[in-house]
Amino acid sequence: MAMTVLATVGVSAASAPPAHATQVITDIAYAPAQPAGSRGHLLDLYLPSTGITPRPLLIWHTGSAWTSDDGKAGTDAIANIFNPLGFAVAGVSVRSSAQAIFPAQVHDIKAAIRWLRANAATYQIDPNRFAIMGDSSGGWLTEMATLSGGVAALEGTVGTTGVSSAVQTGLAFYSPTDFLQMNAQNLPTGGLDHNSPASPESLLVGCPIQTCPAQVAQANPMTYVDSNDPPLMFLHGQADFLVPHGQSVLLYNRIKAQCGNATFVSVPGADHMVPQIMDPAQYGMQTVRTTSNCAETVGTGTLNPTWANFATFLRGGLKMGTSCEVTYSTGVWNGAFNGSVTIRNTGTTAIDGWTLTWTWPGNQQITTAWNATVTQTGTQVTVRDAGHNSYVGPGSSQSFGFSATATGTNDIPAQFKLNNIVCTRVPA
């Protein structure tokens, strides 16, 4: 029963396909089933009807205390949130601890990432913008994938090989991080006996955890922390009965000591469920610790656990930008005009690769452009960087120009979107 409780997610699954997904492809085999007929090597893919291409990808895995081989269940609820934001979403299943012990589960998630990257062009996914997210044992899988990039022993030979299994950012809910310290960190009112031979952690590694510390160390996300890791956000409830809150404290302190990049959101009163972590009643009371480049900030209520804020964090980690300004000016003559556009990164993270989109309010038609690649379909305009100007650091800007024809009023477009976020328009 304890394992069943540990699997509680709280992200409600919808039976209907996400409204913003143009295509839902289920039960894609990213590797042969092991054992035959099992579900651990399947993934579902939700492709959005909005946003630019190639699309950033968010990988989701639902926690189960490692007891289920159907971790992609419930991904439709995640897709309902992130498809409208222009993200492709992949729900990935891995083998259960009853089917294979560690490191099989990490081999599996890395195989799924490799398959998705190898097939990125087919699904118009950006192979350089992979994010991963999960809860409980899914949070553990998220942290393992995010922190263990380049660790050859955890790659395995499952499925597609010869392709990078790296992700660019991760977001984890209440993950175990150091199995041997879990019992000591249990709440005063009690908790699971993680040292038991029948505990989820013991079953994962194939031995009572206190009897095989070397094997356990290889299964701890803590083991793989270094200063080169991608940015990671993790959230934990201070009243978590199943995975002690102290597990995330340990991880944050390790990342801080290694001068890594992490955001730790500690939520008072929350137990082991996403809805409790995200409960609006707790807004303004959570402790938020951020460490980057050996500098730390600590605040109370500075980042509410909302999907919008999670999306902003992921966008920053994927170097897509989180806020922007656009300056647009024209020089007009009879029946034609030149346009000059400057985009400015007003966020705190870099943009590496950009696409600007807008809709003409009239019959404007672009004829040529410089410092960018411009395409127009009807009134829809898509502008992509020219390569040499793809990087826009915080507070920095890039510009491009174009020539176009027009008759009538030639009004300024009502809205500009940079990498699918709305920019503030600044008068020229």
Image (cartoon, helix red, strand yellow):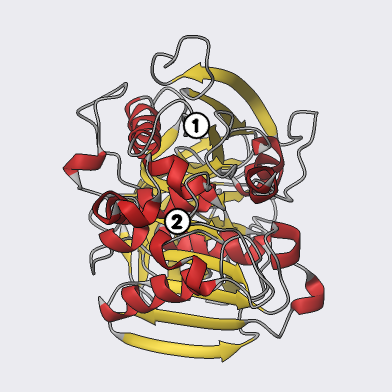
In the picture of the structure, the residue carrying the numbered disc 1 is 96
In the picture of the structure, the residue carrying the numbered disc 2 is 170
* Relative depth, front residue between 255 and 80: 255
Residue depicted at x 36% and y 48%: 145
Q: On screen, 33 above or below 166? A: above
User: How busy is the neighbourhood of tag 1: few (under 14 within 10 Å), some, or many (20 plus)?
Assistant: many
Residue 230 picture location, percent across and down: 33, 60
Residue depicted at x 66% and y 44%: 78
Q: Nearer the viewer, mark 2 or mark 1?
A: 1
Q: Quadrant of residue 217?
A: bottom left
Q: Quadrant of residue 318?
A: bottom left
* Relative depth, front residue between 151 and 331: 151
Q: Are marks 2 and 1 in contact (CB under 8 Å)?
A: no
From the viewer's perspective, is 24 left or right of 109?
A: right
Q: Which amino acid does the dot numbered 2 rest on? A: Gly
* Relative depth, front residue between 359 and 15: 15
Instruction: Name the residue furthest top.
Output: 36
Q: Quadrant of residue 102?
A: top left
- Residue 248's tag is none
Q: Quadrant of the N terminus?
A: top right
Q: Quick check: can you spot residue 340? A: yes
Q: Which amino acid does the dot numbered 1 rest on? A: Ser
From the viewer's perspective, is 284 left or right of 155?
A: right
Residue 324 picture location, percent across and down: 51, 69
Q: Is tag 2's residue or tag 1's residue first in the polypeptide sequence?
A: 1
Q: Quick check: can you spot residue 348? A: no
Residue 161 picture location, percent across and down: 23, 26
Residue depicted at x 51% and y 18%: 28
Residue 418 picture location, percent across and down: 51, 57
* Relative depth, front residue between 411 and 266: 266
